[in-house]
Image (cartoon, rainbow, N blue to C red):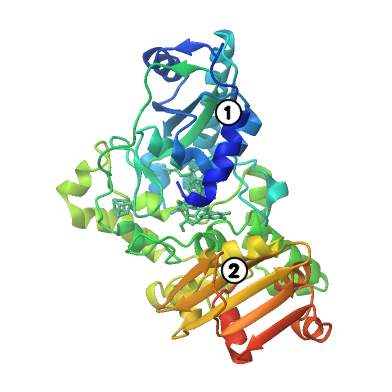
Amino acid sequence: MSEAHEPTRRRALTTLTISAGAPAMSAAELRALCLEAGADDVGFVEIERGALAPDLADIVAVLPRTRTVIGLVRRMGVENVRSPMRSVANAEFHAATHDVQDVEREIVRRLERAGVRAAYAPPGFPMEAARFGAEKVWVVSHKVVAEQAGLGSMGIHRNVIHPRFGNFILLGTVFAEVTLDRYDAPLAESPCLGCKLCVAACPVGAIKSDGTFSWAVCATHNYREFLGGFIDWVDELTDAAGALGYHRRFEDHETVSMWQSLSFGPNYKAAYCLSVCPAGDDVIGPFLADKKEHLERVVRPLQEKEETVYVVAGGDAEAHVRKRFPRKRVKVVGSGMRPRSARAFVEALPWLFSTHGAGDLRAKYLFRFGGAETFTASVTIGDGGIGVNFAPGDRADVTIEADAASWVSFVRGEAGLVGLLLRRRVRVRGDLRLMRRFKRCFPT
Ligand code: B12
Ligand code: SF4
């Protein structure tokens, strides 16, 4: 648990009515109920567990007297997920997502019949869209719950790998006003083999060998037809002057794919990290028997698939696709990611950072925000990495003093920097060339 979340956790915990009167159950009884409801595996976490801190306020908002958080998994069809045909893989993702929600609902129904109040979090969508650009849009991180419930561990690709089913699972979470005699603990050992096939298969290079994951790079391609990708499509659509202008920006297959996403559920553009992962007792056999065959049969078709790959201009992904996957077509788009507050702007910087854009830059930037938001933060860039500090000292290569709302309108592309500088809504001290280089570090 990060220290930043500790005050939130304490506030949320004080709103919980401590268990007097909360029904009790044995973990064995609850486990049987969840498996009968259709879960393939299940585990339990007590609400006070520190790892839940980032989501605690939201859990309490859903069910104020939650005592137990139930993590569950549903298996997916391995060969569907591995298919290079997106319709085949996506049919399974959608069906499994609905399965998870059905299981969650059935658990809630059975608990209510037993006199226990319970509620479930959506497995994927809908999300808290009103928060988009300001804070996390999911109610609870199912991956964190699953890890804490001992259902698996996140592999290098940041998906949860179940020791038996591998990563061919989707996750769900139920909150319940029930106390248990026993709770589960994280696995002692991760099922991840460290083979890095997920790193080799990811079409946009979002997964790095050292285990760092760029969600912005992944989302720009994979989520092209929802969230930020949809925002960018609407911007382009409304900017295009008539049908011809639209056709210059989009090919017909993209329009059809967008219609399909809106009608039948979002088209994920890839989930190749899951497809190639050999971990898990039920999955690993053929890989161990013949690794070369696994590469030829599962990994290669995905790497060689001819498809459009969506990237932002000048980001790490653009260079990666052109170098590693010459058969794939690069399409430069906007990510549609636009912060709604100065704090969200600063917090998102590590997730948007491009090592390619940063090059050999070494500099410290100090932001002092005033107006609607008052805080100071520093951003240090060097050695291809980035650090953000909300309690910085005064020394920096560039100091930016800005009215928070004006700065947000600048980064959202709604106001020009020169105008803001002239109106003294933004002041910059230090080397102005470093400001231009700063922008290149965060392509959106
Ligand atoms: C947001 C999200 C995404 C984002 C970010 C992914 C991520 N790693 O966090 C994007 C769009 C990239 C994404 C992609 C995919 N997702 Co997704 N996604 C989620 C969601 C809603 C929350 C994930 C989460 O817990 N993030 C927070 C922390 C715990 O994750 P993390 O890995 O430690 O943190 C990284 C990023 O999130 C980021 N980060 C950290 N803090 C913050 C704060 C904010 C505000 C943001 C935006 C980012 C961010 O930095 C970290 C490292 O780079 C969950 C559903 C849910 N409600 O839980 C599904 C979920 C994780 N996705 C899932 C799947 C299957 C996918 C895809 C395969 C696409 C698909 N076909 O469905 C890809 C796989 C990408 C990958 N290798 O991770 C499954 C995973 C199943 C499993 N076995 O683990 C989940 C659990 C849905 C489900 N019900 O099963 N996803
Ligand atoms: S593909 Fe290999 S390295 Fe990646 S998560 Fe699976 S086991 Fe771990």
User: What's the mark number on residue 422?
Assistant: none
Local secondary structure at mark 2: strand
- Residue 113 located left or right of residue 158: right
Label 1 CB sits under 8 Å from any ligand 1 atom: no
Q: Is mark 2 within 8 Å of ligand 1?
A: no
Which residue type does callout 2 highlight? Ala
Front position in the image: 88 or 237: 237
Residue at the far top in the pictured view: 114
Residue at the location (40% across, 72% down)? Answer: 325
Q: Is residue 59 visible?
A: no
Residue placed under numbered mark 1 in the picture: 120
Query: Given this view, does label 1 or label 2 mark the residue nearer the observer?
Result: 2
Left/right of residue 258 with respect to residue 424 in the rendered view: left
Q: In x, y percent, where is residue 134?
A: 67, 55
Instruction: In the rendered view, tell whether residue 40 sits above or below residue 29.
Output: below
List the residue tagged with mark 2.
Answer: 377
